[in-house]
């Protein structure tokens, strides 16, 4: 059979742009962490914490996270289906529309246009752009899967399809709004319904954008890296369907102890705890895939990123259900514990897997050896240490904060004023900023290493043919 | 219980039934060889 001609030009472009947006996201993250401890670093009206924080989160999720999804999905789908991308023209349009959307988001958020919905702050014209972008991407990937030359579908393709469909549904439902001007709209839902829909979106965006795609990457790049197949494909399929069945019910655990109906909260709590099973199904599958290969943890920098990333996923999916239990939530909700939890997922799980995927891709799409393995190892340790400093400092801060908020005197009055609890946070917030800075150094080394790979890396194999497939 | 609640319950049980059917199908001994085949084919040279 004639070898299919894969489009790697577009993969290169998405890698470049996702790296840029990732750098911006982490840099802005470090800046906002410093603004928490040094209020003089706020420069109103544009460069304040309130304006920059959504830029940090949106650049991280939509620029870095989604950018890597675009690059890896296009790379993987062609190889898993043994067929070229369905439309190279659509992919090219998607690339530039993606960047236009990210830039438009950043500008409008800096100008203060916001829906005030966390992780969905962009106003309705940007929502329209996001929907167009995602539909174009989804059609291209799904059509490629439809014309595949492989009868059986590998697990990564299932996770990819779930992400494509899931994100589309979540985004469309949560974006329903009534525009009253070019940059102002009101949600189509009111009160507790609005909150419920929003956190259904918020938590499942984590599922469909930050869990399913990294799992697709993990299941693809781990065996490609170690050279041995995953432990059990059937276990991966069962874990996949369990995850899909359970995840969409869990959003209301963000709304425990609120006016949302009690039964909705209990349902979310129960499904959150049940979700441990499919999550750890994937974790065990990953660990068991390393049987006889654990020596590669010492020898192969890619395996380090993948397995430690998976370990963070395992920890994240134990801690999350714990937090979804009413009594525990009552203690830690609204404290700094919560951002520590989220950043274990984003800096540990998602970024580690994304780094590994890009380290795998770049030498192959450029036909060059990685410029420096020691630098890649240094990047790994900076990422790990930065993440741990970040999260551990805020877990301690969160427990302290919760303890102080709940402390009462014998007459029932509060022991501490809110300001006293804030002052206690400063050392931990400094530690958080230091952790973020260490993580930032890591991505600088990462980008330098990749840049030098492209510029000066030794040729090892002929670059993969980059001619266009069909249009 | 109104019609909306009955429909909601029905959909939930329907989804659960589909999920159970998928698990049973995946775990069948007869399905073992084909179910595990993709993990080998994905390792073929790109």
Image (spheres, coloured by chain):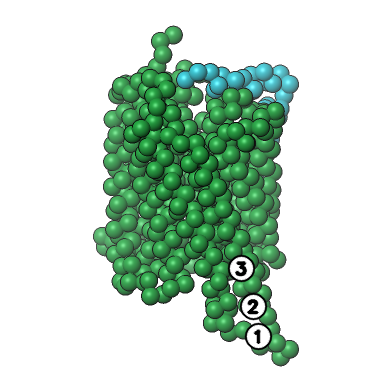
Q: Position of residue A441 (x, y in %)?
A: 45, 52
Chain whose colour in the figure is cyan: B
Q: Position of residue A165 (x, y in %)?
A: 47, 39
Q: Residue at x 50, y 45 (%)?
A: A379
Q: Residue at x 28, y 36 (%)?
A: A93
Chain whose colour in the figure is green: A
Callouts 3 and 1 close, C-beta under 8 Å: no
* Quadrant into which the N terminus of chain A falls: top left
* Quadrant into which the C terminus of chain A falls: top left
Circle 2 is placed at which residue position? Answer: A404
Circle 1 is placed at which residue position? Answer: A415
Callouts 1 and 2 close, C-beta under 8 Å: yes
Q: Residue at x 57, y 33 (%)?
A: A300
N-term-proximal mark, 3 vs 2: 3
* Residue that sits furthest to the top in the current view: A1
Circle 3 is placed at which residue position? Answer: A398
Instruction: Mark yes or no: residue A207 visible.
Output: no
């Amino acid at each position: 059979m004639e070898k299919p001609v894969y489009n790697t030009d577009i993969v290169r472009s998405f890698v470049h742009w996702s790296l840029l947006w990732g750098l911006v996201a982490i840099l802005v993250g470090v800046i906002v962490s410093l603004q928490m401890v040094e209020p003089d670093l706020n420069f109103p009206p544009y460069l304040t914490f309130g304006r920059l924080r959504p830029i940090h989160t949106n650049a991280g999720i939509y620029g870095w996270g989604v950018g890597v999804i675009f690059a890896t999905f296009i790379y993987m789908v062609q190889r898993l289906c043994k067929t070229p991308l369905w439309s190279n023209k659509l992919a090219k349009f998607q690339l530039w529309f993606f960047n236009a959307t990210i830039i438009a988001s950043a500008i409008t958020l800096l100008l203060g246009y916001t829906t005030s919905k966390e992780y969905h702050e962009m106003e309705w014209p940007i929502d329209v752009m996001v929907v167009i972008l995602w539909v174009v991407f989804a059609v291209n990937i799904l059509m490629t899967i439809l014309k595949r030359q492989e009868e059986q579908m590998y697990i990564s393709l299932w996770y990819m399809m779930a992400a494509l469909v899931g994100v589309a549904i979540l985004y469309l439902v949560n974006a329903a709004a009534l525009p009253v001007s070019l940059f102002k709209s009101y949600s189509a839902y009111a009160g507790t319904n609005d909150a419920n829909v929003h956190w259904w979106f918020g938590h499942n965006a984590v599922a469909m954008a930050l869990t399913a795609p990294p799992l697709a990457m993990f299941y693809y790049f781990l065996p490609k890296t170690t050279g041995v197949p995953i432990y059990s494909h059937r276990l991966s399929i069962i874990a996949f369907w369990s995850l899909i069945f359970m995840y969409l019910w869990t959003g209301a655990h963000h709304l425990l102890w609120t006016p949302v109906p009690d039964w909705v909260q209990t349902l979310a709590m129960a499904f959150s705890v049940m979700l441990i099973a499919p999550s750890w199904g994937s974790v065990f599958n990953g660990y068991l895939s390393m049987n006889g290969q654990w020596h590669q943890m010492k020898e192969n920098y890619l395996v380090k990123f993948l397995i430690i990333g998976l370990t963070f996923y395992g920890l994240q999916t134990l801690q999350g259900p714990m937090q979804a239990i009413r009594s525990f939530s009552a203690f830690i909700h609204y404290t700094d514990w919560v951002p520590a939890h989220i950043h274990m997922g984003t800096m540990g799980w998602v970024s580690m897997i994304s780094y590994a995927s890009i380290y795998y891709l770049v030498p192959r799409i450029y036909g060059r050896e990685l410029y420096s393995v020691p630098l890649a190892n240094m990047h790994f340790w900076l990422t790990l240490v930065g993440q741990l400093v970040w999260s551990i400092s805020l877990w301690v801060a969160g427990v302290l904060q919760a303890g102080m908020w709940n402390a009462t005197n014998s007459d029932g009055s509060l022991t501490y004023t809110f300001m006293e609890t804030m002052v206690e946070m400063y050392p931990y917030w400094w530690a958080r900023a230091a952790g973020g800075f260490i993580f930032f150094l890591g991505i600088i080394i990462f980008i330098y290493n990749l840049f030098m790979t492209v510029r000066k890396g030794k040729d090892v194999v002929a670059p993969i043919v980059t001619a266009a497939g069909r249009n | 219980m109104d019609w909306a609640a009955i429909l909601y319950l029905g959909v939930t049980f329907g989804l659960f039934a589909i999920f159970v059917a998928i698990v049973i199908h995946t775990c069948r001994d007869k399905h073992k060889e084909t179910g595990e085949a993709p993990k080998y084919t994905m390792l073929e040279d790109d």
